[in-house]
Each structure stands twice: as C-alpha cells, then as structure tokens.
Image (cartoon, rainbow, N blue to C red):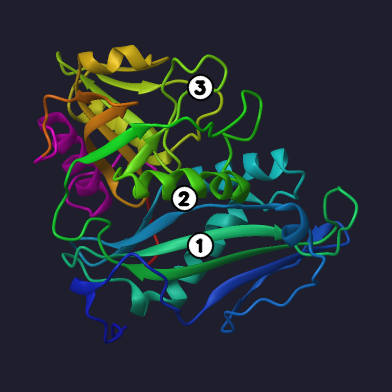
C-alpha cells in the first residue's frame, strides 16, 4: 500500500487523524462484534459515567515497520492483560484479550498507509481505551461502555537526540498505598497534571514520586518506570504494589539478563541509595528509555556518573537491543513480535 504524503522525519509527538478506528459497545451485559469506522467523533450523554466519575482506562503501544518491510506490534498480549486488570479494578466489563489483539491488528492494517517507513525514526502510536458511556448520576458503575482504538503517526519522542533529564523529588503523591497506581486509569494521569506543570515551571523535566506511606522509597514518574544501573552493572528496578507494570520495563529486564548477560533485580529502592547508582533512566512506550542525569531533592543535587550529555553505556546497550528487537534487526524472544502485514 502506498504511504500517505507525510514528512515522516519532521513528525512531532502529537495527534494526527487517520482513516479508521475500531469501536465496540457493551450493552445488556455483552459486547457487540465491533467494527471499523471512519468518524473520529464520539457522541454520548452529558451524564455519561466517564464524564461524571472518570470511569475510563487506556493503553499505549506502537506499530513499527521492520527492516524487512513487515508491519508489527510489540507484545500486544501484555497490553490486553493490563487493560483487563484496569477494567476489573474500575468495575468495568473486560474486553476479551484475544479480541483486543485482533482489534489492534484490524486498526493497524486499515491504517497501514500511516505506518512510518523503516529508518524514519517515526512509528504509529496505538491508543486502545474504554469508558462508561451510559448516564450515571449516583456514584456507581455505568451500565454501558464503549471500547475504542485509534492510531496516529508520531515522531521520535526526543527531537534532535536524547538529552539526559533533570527531575525533582516531588512533594505530591502519585497514588495511595492501596489505590489505583498499578492500573492505567485516566484518573491517575489527571492527578499528575498539576505536579508536572509545576515541575516544568520550576525548570525540571519530570517528577520522582516516592512511596506515599514512608516517603523514603522510589516509585515512578507520572508516566514511566525507573531503571537504575549500579556501578558493577547490575540493572535494578523499584518494586511496589502501586507502580504501573510497564511492558517496556519488563521487556528491558529480560533483555538485560538474556541478551546482555547482566544481573537484574526488582526490589525496593530507597531515595538515599540514588547517590550510589551509576546510571538512571525512565522507561516507557514513548521513548523506550529516557536517560536521567540529575535528581534534585529539595535543593540537594544527586548527579549520576553517566553525566548530562549522553545516555549511559549500559542504558544505551539496553536501548539499542530492545529497539533492534522491535525493528527486526535482532531476533526477538518467542511471542514478542506480533506481525500484522
């Protein structure tokens, strides 16, 4: 299929309307078959559950053009499983995991003209989401829901190359100890907007959230998990029941162990340990790994030896290996690459 006339190399990370999206409705206790539709607009009651009580969850993933010209997605089964967890926590009906993966394939295939070519640095971002659509005035779950998937071509998260970030230790809490931090609920991201705007206003790129109970342990940022490298090249990630289980982070830990032969550890990470790490990064779908050069804890600077000019050497190997797998340059573990066309 002929690609759209888009300046792929100059794409930003924003929304561009594509031709088709997938829509399925839940009514009378069951999902319909769903269909691809052209209309990007949504019509619903002014009293819809999503508008009144934020009953919504979402996922984020990408489609890639590989080196040999295939269009693939990366571990969509894990996105389906994570969305199931989100739905259960928010008292929403689960969209079947096999149907989720099938719908992702249908949407990407229908919009394959928008999948950026290999080597452009751009990808097709995929956004599955679900929301309560029926009227709800008392505080209770909606009775009807809509599951949708749209796509949009996006450029690299970092224009002009990767620059290590400066982040601050936040005074805000991202999630309650027994709250919704472990699921991908829209309400979590609404709560993070004021802290991130505040951080940017003060000259920081992101927030480091600590555990809300003791405020001594590292959790995550508003939209990414942390990854640390010790001075003897061990890969460490924080462990907490209120951290979102990042698919990128889980994949990087396997890459570290099985491809790079590094020791890996998921454990509680204390704030006062940061000075002992050699490298730090934020990992997620958008950028894979964003290097962190400095953490500022209420005026006290914690600078990582990897510095403020480049990605650290171990972080760079992790990044290159995982993106090589995603783009088809490196053989993937079984089941990681879902071919669409």
Mark toward the start of the polypeptide (3 vs 2): 2
Residue at x 82%, y 66% (from the top left corner): 47
Mark toward the start of the polypeptide (3 vs 1): 1
Q: Is residue 225 above or below residue 301?
A: below
Task: Tell whether label 1 touches label 2 (CB within 8 Å).
Answer: yes
Q: CA distance from mark 3 to mark 2?
A: 29 Å
Q: Is residue 97 left or right of residue 73?
A: right
Q: Which residue bears the numbered disc 2?
A: 76
Q: CA distance from mark 2 to mark 1?
A: 8 Å
Count residues near mark 2 (Cα–Cα under 10 Å), then give few for <14, some for 14-19, many for 20+. many
Task: Identify the magenta region.
Answer: 309-335
Residue at x 57%, y 17% (from the top left corner): 213
Q: Is residue 52 above or below residue 299?
A: below
Instruction: Identify the secondary structure beneath mark 2.
Output: helix
Residue 26, image quadrant: bottom right
Residue 116, image quadrant: bottom left
Measuring from the top left, give residue 184's x and y in whole percent: 56, 44
Q: Is residue 177 left or right of residue 3?
A: right
Q: Nearer the viewer, mark 3 or mark 1?
A: 3
Residue 120, image quadrant: bottom left
Give 339 or 111, whichever is nearer the viewer: 111
Q: Nearer the viewer, mark 3 or mark 2?
A: 3
Q: Which residue bears the numbered disc 3?
A: 211
């Amino acid at each position: 299929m002929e690609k759209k006339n888009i300046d792929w190399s100059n794409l930003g990370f924003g929304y561009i309307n594509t031709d088709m999206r997938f829509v399925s409705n839940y009514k009378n206790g069951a999902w319909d078959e769903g269909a691809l539709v052209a209309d990007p607009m949504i019509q619903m009651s002014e009293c819809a559950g999503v508008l009144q009580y934020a009953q919504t969850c979402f996922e984020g993933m990408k489609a890639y053009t590989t080196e040999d010209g295939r269009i693939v997605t990366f571990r969509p089964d894990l996105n389906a499983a994570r969305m199931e967890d989100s739905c259960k926590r928010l008292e929403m009906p689960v969209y079947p995991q096999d149907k989720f993966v099938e719908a992702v394939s249908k949407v990407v295939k229908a919009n394959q003209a928008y999948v950026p070519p290999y080597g452009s640095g751009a990808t097709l971002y995929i956004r599955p989401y679900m929301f309560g659509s029926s009227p709800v005035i008392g505080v209770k779950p909606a009775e009807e829901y809509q599951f949708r998937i749209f796509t949009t071509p996006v450029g690299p998260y970092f224009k002009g190359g990767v620059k290590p970030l400066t982040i601050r230790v936040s005074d805000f809490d991202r999630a309650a100890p027994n709250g919704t931090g472990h699921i991908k609920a829209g309400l979590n991201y609404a709560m993070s907007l004021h802290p991130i705007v505040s951080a940017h206003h003060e000259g920081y790129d992101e927030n480091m959230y600590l555990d809300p109970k003791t405020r001594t342990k590292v959790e995550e940022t508003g939209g990414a998990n942390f990854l640390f490298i010790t001075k003897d090249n061990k890969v460490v990630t924080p462990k907490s029941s209120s951290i979102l289980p990042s698919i990128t982070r889980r994949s990087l830990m396997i890459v570290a162990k099985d491809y790079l032969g590094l020791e890996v550890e998921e454990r509680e990470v204390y704030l006062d340990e940061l000075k002992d790490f050699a490298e730090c990064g934020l990992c997620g779908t958008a950028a894979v790994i964003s290097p962190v050069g400095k953490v500022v804890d209420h005026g006290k600077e914690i600078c990582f030896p990897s510095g403020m000019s480049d990605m650290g050497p171990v972080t760079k190997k992790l990044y290159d290996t995982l993106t090589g797998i995603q783009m088809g340059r490196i053989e993937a573990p079984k089941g990681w690459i879902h071919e669409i066309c």
